[in-house]
Amino acid sequence: MTSYDVIVVGLGGMGSAAVRHLAARGKRVLGLERFTPAHDRGSSHGGSRIIRQSYFEDPAYVPLLLRAYELWAEAEKEAGADLLTLTGGLYLGPPDSTTFAGSLRAAREWDLPHEVLEPDAVRARFPTFAPAADELAVFEERAGFVRPEAAVAAHLELAARDGADLRFGQQVLSWDATGDGVCVRTAEGEHRAERLVISPGAWAPSVLADLGLPLRVERQVQYWFAPPGGVEPFAGNPVYVAEQAEGAQIYGFPAMDGPDGGVKVAFFRRGRDTDPDALDRVVTDAEVQEMRARVGHTLPGLVGPVLRTVPCMYTTTPDEHFVIATHPEHANVTVACGFSGHGFKFVPVVGEILADLATTGATAHPIALFDPRRFP
Ligand SMILES: Cc1cc2nc3c(=O)[nH]c(=O)nc-3n(C[C@H](O)[C@H](O)[C@H](O)COP(=O)(O)OP(=O)(O)OC[C@H]3O[C@@H](n4cnc5c(N)ncnc54)[C@H](O)[C@@H]3O)c2cc1C
């Protein structure tokens, strides 16, 4: 039996970056994924993910973001792929909202280039946006979007180029770890290695059941609307997050899918619970109407017919911070899950952290916030 240094379970966003960084360090890597490369049954599909720096979730993420930008550029160059597009980012809401006040706080704390815009200035600069009189916006130039499927594919390709053994259609049925190493079982047999990285996305509640994490798997729909006046006015837009009544946040992208592709929008959080093996792919009229009403508040010209809807999953922790750590019971197992709907922009830096933890047991990156032992 081939012996590996590290086995990585789950080759979605985080796992693809983990195999890439491990293989680049000369490790003998086996990657196991139950579906196909860059599939649409987990959390890393739908064409676009926002990337931004003035992080309203917590300024503690900013150093990781700065490193992620460097690594996105490096992955683009090495893979010859177009992964990140800067469009600018607009974070709108009432003055005391998480979206506005939290973005401003992070920008100030880390001295990130940004502007504060009054509603008139938003309208003048970005004519498709119609903020209410009591809303303010932070604008930052260094925001934009990354392409999730292309990013997963690029990381897998770089890993394979460096010799990683990547296998698809391989569901991991069980794993265990002892002082001597780790053992992973699939329908085809057993695989052994010195170390294990587990990045199972929405399947964390079962694959990492032993951790007893309080995770919630949420169904989240991505919508593409056809603006009645055509997509052209939306083509030069920034990415945005807009916070409305009761803290509801929507976010969206510029038109980026051609004249008939529509413009993508979605709700941030507040999805309904789902079983990852029974994700409901039917999106109801009531759901479309609710999205339409929220979009109409911020981008009235966007509410035309819905062209496409694509469900996806968040795996959410109670404090909405990630779980990235050495397994508390097994020093040779590294875990990454609970990305709570905001993990994709961090993919390459999470890959670097997982490679650090799986090879040296430590990382210089600040990950104290992501300790699984914070939950009772
Ligand atoms: C609608 C939506 C919008 C989002 N928007 C943003 C955004 O704008 N910005 C942002 O930063 N983030 C965003 N996110 C969040 C981000 O996409 C996720 O945090 C990220 O994709 C999670 O990556 P992952 O590797 O944990 O999960 P995944 O990419 O799903 O990977 C997990 C993999 O593990 C595999 N797996 C599971 N169990 C097994 C097993 N037993 N054996 C083998 N393989 C297994 C799965 O098949 C899957 O491929 C969004 C998510 C969604 C759903």
Image (cartoon, rainbow, N blue to C red):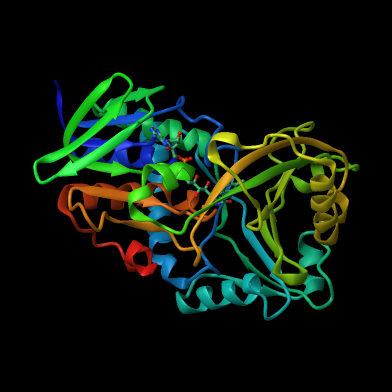
Residue 147 sits above or below residue 360 on the image: above
Horizontal arrangement in the rendering, residue 332 relative to residue 289 (left or right): left
Judge by depth and name the residue closer to the eye, 296 or 229. Answer: 296
Question: Would you say residue 133 is visible in this rendering?
Answer: yes
Q: For the N terminus, which image quadrant?
A: top left
Across and down, in percent, residue 12 comes to 44, 37
Q: Residue at x 42, y 28 (%)?
A: 34
Residue 165 sits above or below residue 252 on the image: above
Question: Would you say residue 26 is visible in this rendering?
Answer: no
Across and down, in percent, residue 189 comes to 25, 21
Res 46 → quadrant: top right
Q: Residue at x 64, y 47 (%)?
A: 220
Q: Can you name the residue that lies furthest to the left here?
A: 180
Across and down, in percent, residue 224 comes to 75, 40
Q: Can you name the residue that lies furthest to the right here?
A: 228
Q: Residue at x 51, y 74 (%)?
A: 106
Q: Residue at x 30, y 18 (%)?
A: 188
Across and down, in percent, residue 267 comes to 69, 54
